[in-house]
Image (tube, grey):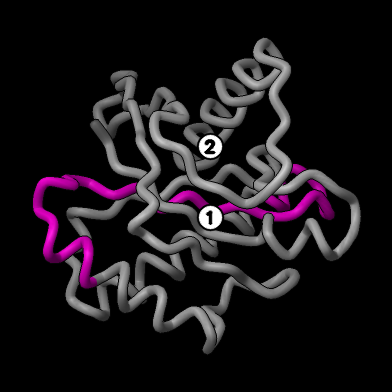
Amino acid sequence: MERRSTALVVVAVLGLAMASMGCQQTGPSKTAGDGGGEFQTDTGAIETVVTEELSELKTIYFDFDDATIRGDQRGNLKADADTILARADLGVVTLQGNTDERGSEEYNLALGERRADSAKKYLVDLGVPSSRLRTVSFGEAKSAVAGHDESAWKWNRRVDFAVNR
């Protein structure tokens, strides 16, 4: 339940930020300093975390309605694990689960969480300490590509990586 609350806070913060800026991203890309959000800690305190996406960590893509790591994405996760292990300066890396626009908000938040958890488990299996990884779900709120067909949806079913600064 705490994860759902955290995800909803992040989604609300991002939604308000996007609405106030009137921004719409038109293609899959990574930009530095794209935001962050407020997270509730285990003690109940609200912690503001500024995240920065890194182009050196590769986005992981998923099939429709699935949280299983695809065979063609395993090499990307291996490269991500190697980068995280080699770069202690990255600190905690946040795995951001995303979905396409189909499905209810609740369903998409849960699917985004499963995707982030699946990628985290894979990284841990490759030797990345779980203490260096955090997961969050954005569901459908953080689209990489605007559109209402498979040509856009395939880019939105993903896990992005960000570091906490």
Label 1 element class: helix
* Residue lying at 49% horizontally and 61% vertically, measured from the top left: 59
Q: Amino acid at mark 2?
A: Ala
Residue 74 to residue 121: above or below: below
Q: Using the image as rendered, state which of residue 53 and residue 2 is in the foreground.
A: 53
Q: Using the image as rendered, state which of residue 14 and residue 42 is in the foreground.
A: 14
- Density class for disc 2 (Cα within 10 Å; few <14, some 14-19, many ≥20) is many
Mark 1 touching mark 2, by CB under 8 A?
yes
Upstream in the sequence, badge 1 or badge 2? 2
Using residue 17 as the reference point, say whether residue 125 is left or right of it.
left
Q: Give coordinates of residue 136: x percent, y percent.
A: 46, 46
Using residue 117 as the reference point, say whether residue 152 is left or right of it.
right
Q: Which residues are magenta?
A: 82-108
Residue pushed farthest right?
148
Q: Pick the quarter of the image with the C terminus.
A: top left
**Residue at which label 1 appears:** 113
Label 2 element class: helix
Residue 151 to residue 50: above or below: below
Q: Amino acid at mark 1?
A: Glu
Q: Give coordinates of residue 83: x percent, y percent.
A: 22, 65
The quadrant holding residue 151 is bottom right
**Residue at which label 2 appears:** 7
Cα–Cα span, label 1 and label 2:
9 Å
Q: Give coordinates of residue 84: x percent, y percent.
A: 21, 61
* Marking on residue 72: none
Is residue 96 in the magenta section?
yes
* Residue lying at 47% horizontally and 38% vertically, measured from the top left: 31
* Residue lying at 73% horizontally and 65% vertically, measured from the top left: 154
Residue pushed farthest bottom?
71
